[in-house]
Amino acid sequence: MAEDARLAGRILGTLPGRQRTEALLAVSGELEAAKSAVMAANEQDVAEAAAAGLAGPLLQRLKLSDKTFRYMADRLAAVADLPDPLGVITKGHTRPSGLRVQRISVPLGVIGIIYESRPNVTTDAAAVCIKSGNAVILRGGSEALRTNTLLADIMAGAAAKAGLPEKSVQIVRTPDREAVGELLKQEKLIDVIIPRGGKSLIERISAESRIPVIKHYDGICHQYIAADADIDMAIAIVINSKCEKVEVCNALETLLIDAVAAERVLPALSAALKAQGVELRGCPRARAVVDMAPADETDWSTEYLSAVISIKVVDGVDAAIDHINVYGSGHTDGIITVSLDQAERFVAGVDSASVMVNASTRLSGGGDYGLGAVVGISTDKLHARGPVGPEELTSYKWVAYGQGHLRN
């Protein structure tokens, strides 16, 4: 598979952007036509996973609804509409000798993506890779084998009909865990591995991989309510950040409230969270204002992925920044304030891939950033950071144009 992907990638990266775009539009149409078959396969996967005792958050990620299916098809079209990330001259100049030097964007080559539960990763990842001229090898979780295999086959078939190499999109068809180990040994053929899943999966891949890894560790996301925050805005943002979908990586996990605002904000905010069925765990200062369970040291570094939130009262923006930089995962963190100075101080001080000002943490993704689909949200700083879309799956080459130029 890796050898086939390498050959396919070399061709794919040289095709015109228009052809790759048309292939994605064809894939979107084929996916729509196969909706009933995809939903039936997913129902089987969900039933078997539930019977096997798959954890609730993973089961939610596995299940396809009409809304999720619509979202998948729309994202394919959104990626198709993006500018071509290849062949872009990112730097260029002419030397005094007349030598013209350019730096031009090119594909990475072959991407391996290892993921759990979410079938939409199959379509998103394949779309992003096709758009960026990369061949892809997908290895989804065993709990979604039927759904993922069908989705990958639909995409590969449609792409091939549109003139793309037949092996541009491939999927590992065995649930055997040893397949992951074999994939990680293909360092001469696979350029990057992107894991999407639980912490244990990412740690295993990072430890075993002979291939560079773009990692997505915990999504321990924060919102800091500043002393001057508007109460209604703060409540709306916190509820959306936490409750819109609790099981995803950019859901809010820890709420920081300025000590000056605690008595003004906490009663109404806690009532709103409890009305959504959220369990509150707080520091002693928070519990002095509102009745809630005590938080311990482990709560500040826990990604709940469930209807639980930890709350801490802090003394000012600098204390909030310090807490986030100690306990956060570098994913998404936000501030709610009417002060531009405080917002800019927070933005400069927080070391996170996405920093939100008066906005929900749930917006830190490819679609809301205008990137279309993404293959994940990187908490690394190399090679990509934040949402990983087509542009992030490119590298560059230097090209020099001369007229018989020689080194003196």
Image: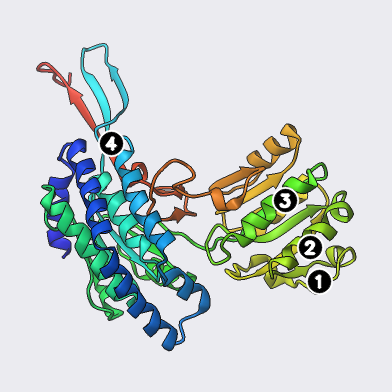
> Dot 3, crowdedness within 10 Å: few (<14), some or many (≥20)?
many
Where is residue 385 drawn, in percent x and y?
46, 48
- Give the quarter of the figure containing the C terminus: top left
Mark 4 vs mark 2, CA separation in Å = 46 Å
Where is residue 288 drawn, in percent x and y?
90, 66
Q: Residue at x 22, y 12 (%)?
A: 97
Q: Is residue 311 left or right of residue 382?
A: right
Mark 1, secondary structure of its residue: loop
Q: Are marks 4 and 2 in contact (CB under 8 Å)?
A: no
Q: Residue at x 24, y 47 (%)?
A: 24
Q: In this view, does 163 lie to the left or right of 172?
A: left
Q: In this view, does 68 lie to the left or right of 171?
A: right
- Counting residues from the start of the chain, the first of labels 2 and 3 encountered is 3
Mark 2 vs mark 1, CA separation in Å = 9 Å
Badge 1 is on which residue?
292
Vertical arrangement, residue 148 with respect to residue 266, above or below: below
Q: Is residue 263 left or right of residue 13?
A: right
Mark 2 vs mark 3, CA separation in Å = 15 Å
* Amino acid type assigned to the residue bearing label 2 in the image: Ser
Where is residue 290 drawn, in percent x and y?
86, 66
* Amino acid type assigned to the residue bearing label 4 in the image: Asp
